[in-house]
Image (cartoon, rainbow, N blue to C red):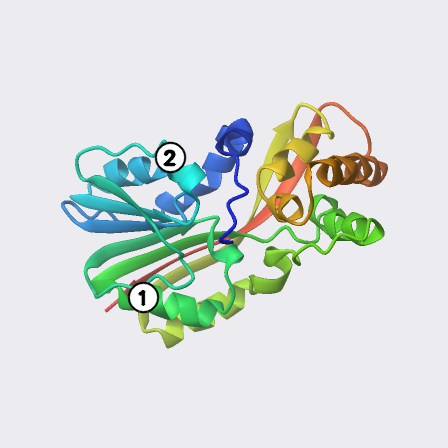
Amino acid sequence: MAATDSWDPCQYRRFEAERDQPFHDLLSLIELVPGGAVVDLGCGDGRLTGLAHRSLGAGSTVGVDSSPAMLADAPATEGLSFELDDIAAWSAPPTYDVVVSNAALHWVADHPTVLGRWRAALRPGGQLAVQVPANFDHPSHRVVGEVADSLGLAVEPDPVAVNVLRPEEYAVILDDLGAVEQHVRLQVFVHHLPSSGDVVEWVKGTTLTRVKRATDEDGYERFLAAYRERLLAEIGDSAPYTYPFKRILFRARFG
């Protein structure tokens, strides 16, 4: 994730149940590792890291994130710890039984190289499990760049559009890294929001953090007003609203 901390944990947690579901689905793909060592890369506020720790039966779990704000309230308990670090450069000797990353890998580039480093941190028989969003073509994401350009804001490109690969490419990467078994899928999560306007609140917690870094408070408010108007013109102003969200989930075991 970016070095400048523009994350707001409260905003991110506004749609907690909806954001949690992909993690539950990812976790269901991972085999239990009683007493094993787990690392959660891009762990955010650490709440789901604790869930992984308990669900997998781990002896120790480390959560890693680059946002001090997100880690501020991370739940440090017995067997559970947290570290401030950049997951793009993170590496470790082969000491982990599971490397898991939920909704974080898309923030970094060069996935073959990064996944190679993550795989190298696994013990023999270790598992790598990752979930990334793939919703760059939905108006909620596409309109961000269009509005930013119209306002003359130099906003970073959508990391999902730039960094996330096709599902079949991840399958090839995992095979090249020596996976002895793997599961890769594209899944559409259907979220029922109170209204189409709530999509603005959704993206404020994630992809709009890059807009916030590119301008001041007044500029951000101007962007939000223009973005809301443009987005609702495309998706309609309705209540409730069905928000389909594509994600890629994969899990592999290595010899």
- 120 relative to 221 in the view: left or right: left
* Residue found at x 78% / y 26%: 238
Does 115 sit above or below residue 22?
below
- 172 relative to 204 in the view: left or right: left
* Residue found at x 55% / y 28%: 14
Does 23 sit above or below residue 92?
above
1 vs 2, front mark: 2
1 or 2: tag closer to the N-terminus: 2
Q: Position of residue 205 (x, y in %)?
A: 58, 37
Amino acid carrying label 2: it is Ala
**Residue 30 visible somewhere in the drawing:** no
Element under disc 1: helix
Q: In which quarter of the image is residue 81?
A: top left
Q: How crowded is mark 1: few (under 14 residues within 10 Å), some or many (20 or more)?
A: many
Who is closer to the viewer here, 69 or 51? 69
Q: Position of residue 146 (x, y in %)?
A: 80, 52
**Residue 46 visible somewhere in the drawing:** yes
* Residue found at x 22% / y 56%: 97
Q: Quadrant of residue 237?
A: top right
Q: In which quarter of the image is residue 82?
A: top left
Q: Name the residue under label 2.
A: 72
Does 238 sit above or below residue 154?
above
Q: Name the residue under label 1.
A: 119
Q: Where is residue 7 in the image (x, y as percent from the top left)?
A: 52, 40
Amino acid carrying label 1: it is Arg
